[in-house]
Amino acid sequence: MDASLRRQFLDALFRIKRADISMPLSSGINISELVALSHIFGKHIFERCGTSNDHVNISDLHHSLHVSRPAVSQMLGSLEKRGLICREIDSADRRKITVALTEDGKEILHKAEGAHQQAFEDVIHQFGEENLRELIRLLNRLADLYEEKKNERMGRA
């Protein structure tokens, strides 16, 4: 492969990452944190910390967010420091830590989802639905190839 093409590809990926669609809210929530809060909220609706056994397991977040365990821990630490989530020891299995949204977390999530949704709609309107469908198809194909190579390297072909 042409080194220039490889560089252009990596530059494009990093530009998208740097764009980071951060919120114009004072919370400074970014897209990764919004996705995490949404996942937690989807599993744990309208319950306060300490009142439900339906908390989200950190391992579930690791898998659903497609990021490393340390990245999840770091993100949760930041969200917890801002009072948006709380972590507790799972009463059914004391080796596990579960996560729930606080009332502030629910409020921020509600505000952030609307703002992110509007920003996404604006970008997609300009980009075009057909282009988005093709991009999704190509990114999934690329992810499949990377996963195949990873499995080959780990001897799980």
Image: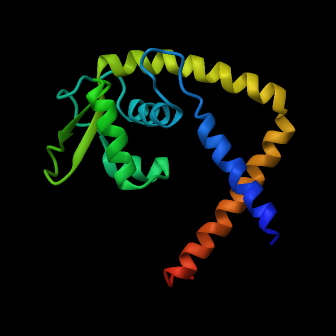
- Give coordinates of residue 41: x percent, y percent: 40, 29
> Residue at position x 67%, y 42% from top?
15
- Give coordinates of residue 62: x percent, y percent: 40, 51
Left or right of residue 117: residue 22? left
Q: Quadrant of residue 99?
A: top left
Q: Quadrant of the N terminus?
A: bottom right
Q: Quadrant of the C terminus?
A: bottom right
On screen, residue 22 above or below 72: above
- Give coordinates of residue 134: x percent, y percent: 82, 48
Task: Looking at the picture, tell me which residue is in the foreground, 23 or 145.
Answer: 23
Q: What kind of colouring is applied to the model shown?
A: rainbow
Residue lying at the far front of the rendered structure: 4
Task: Looking at the picture, tell me which residue is in the foreground, 32 or 24.
Answer: 24
> Residue at position x 54%, y 16% from top?
24
> Residue at position x 18%, y 44% from top?
90
- Give coordinates of residue 57: x percent, y percent: 31, 46
Q: Quadrant of residue 6?
A: bottom right
Q: Quadrant of residue 68?
A: bottom left
Task: Looking at the picture, tell me which residue is in the foreground, 127 or 44.
Answer: 127
On screen, residue 138 above or below 124: below
Total residue callouts = 0
> Residue at position x 42%, y 19% from top?
27
On screen, residue 74 above or below 3: above
